[in-house]
Each structure stands twice: as structure tokens, then as C-alpha cells.
Image (cartoon, grey):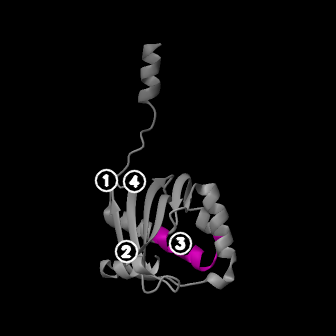
């Protein structure tokens, strides 16, 4: 029996993965990010949601906006159905950092939009490579005012 097990396991094909290519990986993640942005811009909730993992955490700009995929699906579907809230996002910064194996990435994107101007929005995402596809398992949106503006903002919300 032991000989049979050795023969069976040794005769199976090994899947060899090549070394991590950061240039190719960055191109793949950038393509994914562009597809996500296109889905948002065209208000295509189905395509947008296809980039999110089932077990992810998705956070909005309000402290109470913490969702699993089911909750975020309801929120984003409603948001994208509202045609009065279209607002282009103008990037001011984008960074992509990979883990050493190249199977996950942290993405930082800063942008301004009509509803946030002059305060920038920072989108932070964690992507994992699953079945040769990059998927978002964490996303967070936050307003990031300049530190010099914090006293004015604090005074305005008192």
C-alpha cells in the first residue's frame, strides 16, 4: 500500500509557478482598478460587485458605514441607481504595493470629486489573487483634509 501511495503521489503533475514579476502584476492590478472605476462611472453595479470577495469588509466615509458584501451590495446598488450623484474622480495619487510572493496587494488611491472638493478622498484597498483574478477583500474610503484645515473642520462641526 505504501508503494502504491508513493507511485500515485509522485506521478501527479506538479504545477510550477514562475517567479513574481512585479511589472506584470502591477499591470494586472492597474487593469483591475481601471475596470472597477469604469463600472462605477457607468453605474454597472453587477460588474463592480464581481470584483469583491464574499468574505470582505467594505467601509465608507461615515463611522457607521461598515459592511459585509451583502450589506455593501444593497448600498452600492442603491447609490449607483441614483443618476443625480454622478461625479468624476480625478486622481491625485495612486500606489500599489505587493507582498513578496505577489499574491496580494495594498492599493492607495487619492482623488477629488465634486462631493468632496476641496478635501481629498483616500481609497485604501487590499486585493488578493484568486483563480488568476485580482479581487478586493477590503476597501476603505476616508476624507483626508490637510492638517492645517483640521481646526476649521472641527469648529464647523461643533
Q: Which residue is mark 3?
A: 35
Q: Which residue is situated farthest in the top direction here?
A: 1
Classify mark 2: helix, strand or loop. strand
Q: Badges 2 and 1: C-beta atoms under 8 Å apart?
A: no
The disc, 4 or 1, on the residue closer to the chain's N-terminal end is 1
Of residues 21 and 120, which is closer to you in this image?
Answer: 120
Q: Marks 2 and 1: which is nearer the front?
A: 2
Measure how far apart labels 2 and 3 are at the Cα level: 15 Å
Instruction: Quickly name the residue at label 2.
Output: 94
**Separation of disc 2 and disc 4 at Cα?**
19 Å
Image depth: mark 2 or mark 4 in front: 2
Q: Which residue is mark 4?
A: 103
Mark closer to the chain start, 2 or 1: 1
Dot 3 or dot 1, earlier in sequence: 1
Compared to 137, does 48 lie above or below? below
Identify the residue shown where x is 60% and y is 83%: 86
Nearest-to-viewer mark from 4 and 1:
4
Disc nearest the viewer among 2 and 3: 2
Q: Residues within 10 Å of mark 4 (few under 14, many from 20)?
A: some
Residue 43 in the magenta stretch? The answer is yes
Question: Disc 2 and disc 1: Cα gap in Å?
Answer: 25 Å
Name the residue at 45% across, 38% down: 13
The magenta segment:
31-45
Give whichever of 110, 23 is nearer the camera: 110
Discs 3, 1 touching: Cβ within 8 Å? no
Q: Please, what secondary structure does the residue beneath circle 1 have?
A: loop
Q: Which circle's residue, 2 or 3, is located before the other in the chain?
A: 3
Quarter occupied by residue 142? bottom left
- The residue carrying mark 1 is 19
Give coordinates of residue 45: x percent, y percent.
Answer: 64, 69
User: Contact (CB < 8 A) between labels 4 and 1?
Assistant: no
Element type at mark 4:
loop
Amino acid at each position: 500500500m505504501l508503494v502504491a501511495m508513493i507511485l500515485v503521489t509522485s506521478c501527479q503533475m506538479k504545477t510550477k509557478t514562475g517567479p513574481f514579476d512585479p511589472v506584470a502584476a502591477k499591470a494586472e492590478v492597474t487593469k483591475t482598478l481601471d475596470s472597477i472605476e469604469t463600472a462605477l462611472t457607468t453605474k454597472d453595479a453587477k460588474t463592480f460587485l464581481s470584483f469583491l470577495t464574499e468574505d470582505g469588509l467594505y467601509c465608507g466615509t461615515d463611522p457607521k458605514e461598515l459592511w459585509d458584501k451583502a450589506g455593501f451590495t444593497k448600498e452600492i446598488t442603491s447609490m449607483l441607481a441614483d443618476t443625480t450623484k454622478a461625479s468624476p474622480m480625478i486622481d491625485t495619487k495612486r500606489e500599489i504595493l505587493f507582498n513578496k510572493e505577489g499574491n496580494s496587494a495594498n492599493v492607495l488611491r487619492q482623488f477629488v470629486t465634486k462631493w468632496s472638493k476641496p478635501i481629498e478622498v483616500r481609497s485604501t484597498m487590499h486585493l488578493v489573487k484568486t483563480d488568476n483574478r485580482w479581487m478586493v477583500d477590503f476597501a476603505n474610503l476616508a476624507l483626508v483634509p490637510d492638517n492645517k484645515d483640521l481646526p476649521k473642520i472641527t469648529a464647523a462641526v461643533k
